[in-house]
Image (cartoon, rainbow, N blue to C red):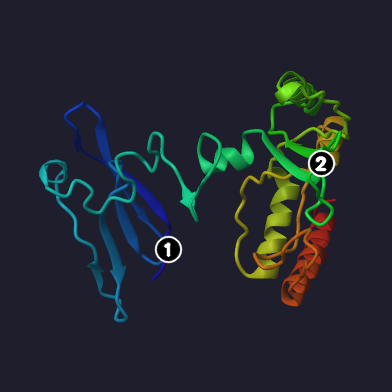
Amino acid sequence: METAPSIARLPFGTTPDGSVVDLYTLTNSSGIAVAVLTYGATIQQLWTPDRDGRKANVVLGFPVLADYLSHDGHYFGAIIGRYANRIANGRFVLDGVAYLGSGSITSRIWSQPSITVIGIDAPSVADASNTLFPSARAKVSLRVPPGQRATDALDKLVAHLESHAPWGARVTVTRGSAGDPGVLPVEGEIAAAATSAFTEAYGVAPVHMGQGGSIPMAADFQRQYPGATILLTAVCDPDSRMHGPNESLHLGDFAKAVLAEALFLAKLGDLA
């Protein structure tokens, strides 16, 4: 027998520093219930039925907060450690190379500027000799995060390059095109229709997440039509190698994307 999903909160205790700990019990329509503490997101109980419908608690937990505080394993049943996965001066090293920058990984790819040298014109190894060349060129890409105008960021980059030239070199910067970043909210009935269409086509609900790349036209369109709903989609998987010389597209993904677009257009017609 199915029941309506529910969330219940009960007081569970107080830590020595005065922080109140609550116990939240989340129950779904099938009767599966999980009890979670606001102390490390600790799972205190997990009730689930067996094949005969008999429910049982399948995890170990303490009945009172004092047991969690005094037990040798402070993190017994905890999902989040005491630092919530944030460690001061933490470093990530891959093949002996430390990851550059500061802040969390997600902030570096979403909410902070990023500079990449994407091309260099200098003597090639095949043509190199023991001589000096009068000039060299490099092409620099500047990723601008939401909240910053691209022209302002470009001005700061140019000023930095011109004022930090090494060994008396003279730097000339040729400005390229600039496009402002944007944040596109997935809200409103049109976005809900798109989410529903993708769910039907792919069989699972889509997960919304921030991404470091941006299409400059989106921000321009957003400024010009502030009331419009803007949705950017792409069909790919981890092996698609987007924008690479060997870019590919799985035909199964392509078929689902076509179906999602057709469903979305039908749902838009229902909204009209």
| Of the pair 76 and 121, the residue shown nearer to us | 121
* Whether residue 4 is situated above or below residue 180 in the rendered picture: below
Residue 231 x %, y %: 77, 48
Task: Count residues near mark 2 (Cα–Cα under 10 Å), then give few for <14, some for 14-19, many for 20+.
Answer: few
Residue at (76% x, 67% y) in the render: 257
Answer whether residue 173 is visible to the viewer in this image: yes
Residue 29 x %, y %: 42, 63
| Of the pair 42 and 117, the residue shown nearer to us | 117
Is residue 1 shown left or right of residue 223?
Answer: left
Residue at (44% x, 42% y) in the render: 91
Q: Which residue is mark 2?
A: 131
The tag earlier along the polypeptide, 2 or 1, is: 1
| SS for callout 2 | loop
Q: Which residue is mark 1?
A: 29
Name which residue type carries label 1. Ser
When asked about the image quadrant of residue 69, the answer is top left
Residue 177 x %, y %: 88, 35
Q: Residue furthest front?
A: 130
| SS for callout 1 | loop
Please give the label number shown on residue 245. none
Name which residue type carries label 2. Thr
